[in-house]
Image (spheres, rainbow, N blue to C red):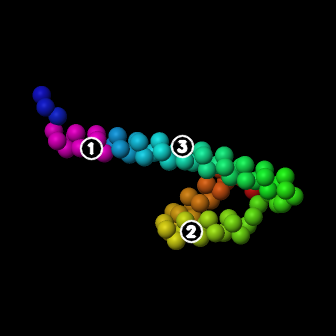
Amino acid sequence: MSVPATDTRTTSLRARIDEIDDAILDLWRERAAISREVGRARLADGGTRLVLSREREILARFSAALGEDGAQLALLLLRAGRGPL
């Protein structure tokens, strides 16, 4: 019994989505780790824990690219790197 072409295509597309999701998760973890490192370096240099102007830049960039969903994604990324306020 052969597999219909649409099932094969769906399986292939889902496999690619899984690959992309894995890459996103890896990048998420890397970004959070780097963000925490930046925060530690900033504190060690006598700076503040947060730089609100930087957070606003990130929010604006994500919002411009993705709208409201971008703003929500940026907030999640920021929280992952610095923890909750």
Residue 46 tag number: none
Most common SS among magenta residues: helix
Outermost residue toward the left in this view: 1
Disc 1: which residue: 10
Residue at mark 2 to residue at mark 3: CA–CA distance: 21 Å
Q: Name the image quarter holding the N terminus.
A: top left
The residue at 87%/58% (across/down) is 46
Residue 26 tag number: 3
Q: Position of residue 13 (x, y in %)?
A: 31, 45
Residue at mark 3 to residue at mark 1: CA–CA distance: 24 Å
Camera-side mark, 3 or 1? 3
Query: Considering only vertical position in the picture, is 65 above or below 35?
Result: below
Within the image, what quadrant is residue 5 found in? top left
The residue at 48%/66% (across/down) is 66
How many numbered marks does the figure carry?
A: 3
Residue at mark 1 to residue at mark 2: CA–CA distance: 33 Å
The answer to whether 68 appears left or right of 31 in the picture is left
**Where are the magenta residues, as a range?**
4-13
Q: Are marks 3 and 1 in contact (CB under 8 Å)?
A: no
Between 6 and 35, the one lying in front of the other is 35
Q: Earlier in the sequence, mark 2 or mark 3?
A: 3
The residue at 73%/53% (across/down) is 38
Q: Is residue 83 visible?
A: no
The amino acid at mark 1 is: Thr
What element does badge 1 sit on? helix
What element does badge 2 sit on? helix
Residue 12 on the magenta segment:
yes
Residue 75 on the magenta segment:
no
Q: Position of residue 12 (x, y in %)?
A: 28, 41
Disc 2: which residue: 61
